[in-house]
């Protein structure tokens, strides 16, 4: 994959997204799509994530974040593109 083929998007997800398996679900879905990056809980009760990979896969993951796992109640997903694209090879849950 060339640098032109790669995109990076940071997402902030608000709603009932902590304590509902959101981070583990995000890792599972991101890995299924072949993305790199991370997901973490924020002190304000939201979840932040960074998705890196082909643009279409990154967009698919952002769309999935709007629903999340079954117990989640997502209120909003805010995104911003990151440039330059960070060099990460895996997708992990950060504490």
Image (tube, rainbow, N blue to C red):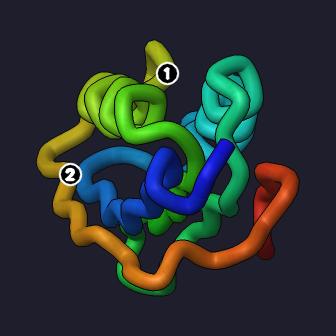
Q: Is residue 63 left or right of residue 37?
A: left
- The Cα atoms of the two marked residues, 1 and 2, are separated by 14 Å
Q: Earlier in the sequence, mark 1 or mark 2?
A: 1
Closest to the observer, 7 or 94: 7
Q: Secondary structure at mark 2?
A: strand
Task: Tell me the residue at 34%/46% (across/down).
Answer: 16
Closest to the observer, 1 or 29: 1
Residue designated by label 1: 69
Q: Is residue 76 left or right of residue 1?
A: left
Task: Tell me the residue at 25%/51% (across/down).
Answer: 15
Closest to the observer, 75 or 53: 53
For disc 2, the neighbor class at 10 Å (few under 14, some 14 to 19, many from 20) is: some
For disc 1, the neighbor class at 10 Å (few under 14, some 14 to 19, many from 20) is: some
Q: Is residue 13 left or right of residue 93?
A: left
Task: Say whether residue 72 is visible.
Answer: no
Please provide percent x and percent y for residue 10.
39, 67
Quadrant of the rendering where the N terminus is positioned: top right
Q: Which mark is residue 84?
A: none
Q: Secondary structure at mark 1?
A: loop
Q: Is residue 37 left or right of residue 67?
A: right
Closest to the observer, 11 or 89: 89
Quadrant of the rendering where the C terminus is positioned: bottom right
Task: Tell me the residue at 75%/30% (across/down).
Answer: 31
State which quadrant residue 39 falls in.
Answer: bottom right
Q: In the figure, 18 relative to 88: above or below?
A: above
Q: In the figure, 34 relative to 19: above or below?
A: above
Q: Which mark is residue 77?
A: 2
Please provide percent x and percent y for residue 67.
30, 24
């Amino acid at each position: 994959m060339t640098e032109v083929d790669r995109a990076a998007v940071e997402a902030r997800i608000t709603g009932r997204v902590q304590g509902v398996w959101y981070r583990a679900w995000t890792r599972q879905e991101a890995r299924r799509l072949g993305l790199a990056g991370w997901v973490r809980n924020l002190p304000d009760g939201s979840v932040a994530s960074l998705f890196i990979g082909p643009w279409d896969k990154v967009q698919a993951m952002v769309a999935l974040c709007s629903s999340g796992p079954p117990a989640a109640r997502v209120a909003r997903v805010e995104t911003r593109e990151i440039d330059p694209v960070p060099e990460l090879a895996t997708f992990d849950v950060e504490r």
